[in-house]
Amino acid sequence: MRPLQDQCEPTPYEFVDALFQTDMGMPLTEVFEEFDPTPIGVASLAQVHIAQHRETGKKVAVKLQHPHLAEFCDIDMKMVEVTLGWVKYWFPEFELTWLGEEMRTNLPKEMDFTLEARNAERTIKDFKSIQTSLYIPDTITATKRVLIMEYIQGGRVDDLEYLADAHIDRNKVALELSRIFNKMVFVNGWFHADPHPGNLLIRPAPKGSRSPFNFEIVLLDHGLYFDIDPILRVNYAKLWLSLIAPASPATTLDRRKYAELVGNVGPDLYPVFEAALTGRAALQSSVDSVKEDDRSFRRASSIIDLQPQSKAELDAIRNAVVSTEGLLTSVFDVLRRVPRRVLMVLKLNDLTRSLDYALMTTHSNIRIFLITAKYCTYAVWQDERKRLIDAMIHKGIFNFPLLRGCFSCWWKFRRQYAKLVIGEIFLDLQAIAIIKKAWVKGLWRKGFQGAHQAAAGLAY
């Protein structure tokens, strides 16, 4: 999929020039002192050129939609809907017509660059009050098919050589990505719905940066965002906390309860939904519930209990897909039932997991789950706090049971949060030790150059 992210076939210069003049009412040469006709990135909907803006004198990135895209997209959407309709007719158990509906709803949003500019502005406001490595380029001008924005030079976030040359810790990058997207989902309730490495850049933190680290993560392409209902958001947080909690009969009941509230799935489909959430084989309690007797690998009882994914686990997943009757149908059934917002959140989960793997991080495989747990804990606490404050407004601020409940909820939050922080410190120390060990090994074999490459996860 990487070529579809930023390496598609470019539209010739004369056609994008004509599009620009149609939308802006003036030629490229009148707006820009310099304009590079060769795009630096070409995706399926648009391409990006570097230019020198006359009015501001700044180096800018000019995003231009492919001409006639609207006409071809309408044809494509009709073809997709017809094809999925035929699939449903011949294979009723494979219900995929919702894909066509989603495409029909979301594609026009991504084709409107004024909406993208508004989304970027809102994201800047959402992160304005905290110290973060996230950076959103400033928008200079936006029309429906033309977007002129601040040019940011950097590398792909999964480029290990770039990170090594800039002395950027890949472990910290993976953790910051997890923090950014978890804040969007669990705190802001409004999140970027098209995340992939092509939409993420990384650069050394410039002077005056708000980043707490020596790098900034630049998030691009803000065409598609979704909000998430507060009730759904809190229930989703509680579902994650139940998956992270130690196994017990009460925890198992909570997992199924919140899975039904969040994903609209019953006990029969719960194991499939759980695997989609975690990206791993089903946990012990889920296996027992479906009477599966595969014991080729050790199943975890909770997310915190997960071990690095082994070949035996991967083989078990493949075998289950091939040999378990009705499993593939169950997967399609889950996709049909789960709310579209939740499916988009699952896409975010996949991104953070895949980037954690692509960055060859040295921390434990459960490290990013601890970040999720922290944001979930905060989201649940904020919900409880709001509920108690609302009750105090109606019953009086000096209501003793409510005051006691407020203190109890706060103490529970602080205690749980502190445990997670301690766990993070322990796992981070382990990760640092692994890097130091690799550095010494590289030094022994290839000198300081080998040490640097080994510590950065590169071959030496």
Image: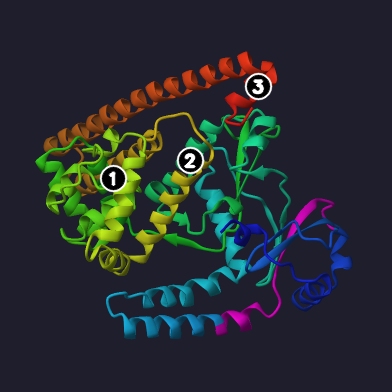
Residue 48 visible in the shown view = yes
Q: Give the quarter of the figure containing the N terminus.
A: bottom right
Q: Is residue 147 above or below residue 413?
A: below
Say which residue appears at 58% left-offset and 61% top-offset.
118
Residue 61 location, x and y as percent?
74, 56
Check residue 150 for magenta coloring.
Answer: no
Residue 378 location, x and y as percent?
33, 39
Disc 1 designates what residue? 240
Q: Amino acid at mark 1?
A: Trp
Q: Give the quarter of the figure containing the C terminus.
A: top right
Q: Amino acid at mark 2?
A: Tyr
Single out the mark in the foreground, 1 or 2: 2
Where disc 3 sits, the SS reads: helix
The mark tally for this picture is 3
Say which residue appears at 57% left-offset and 29% top-offset.
169
Q: Which residue is more in the foreground, 26 or 260?
A: 260
Left or right of residue 378: residue 139: right
Q: Which residues are magenta?
A: 55-75
Left or right of residue 391: residue 126: right
- Rendered image: mark on residue 357: 2
- Rendered image: mark on residue 74: none
Where disc 1 sits, the SS reads: helix
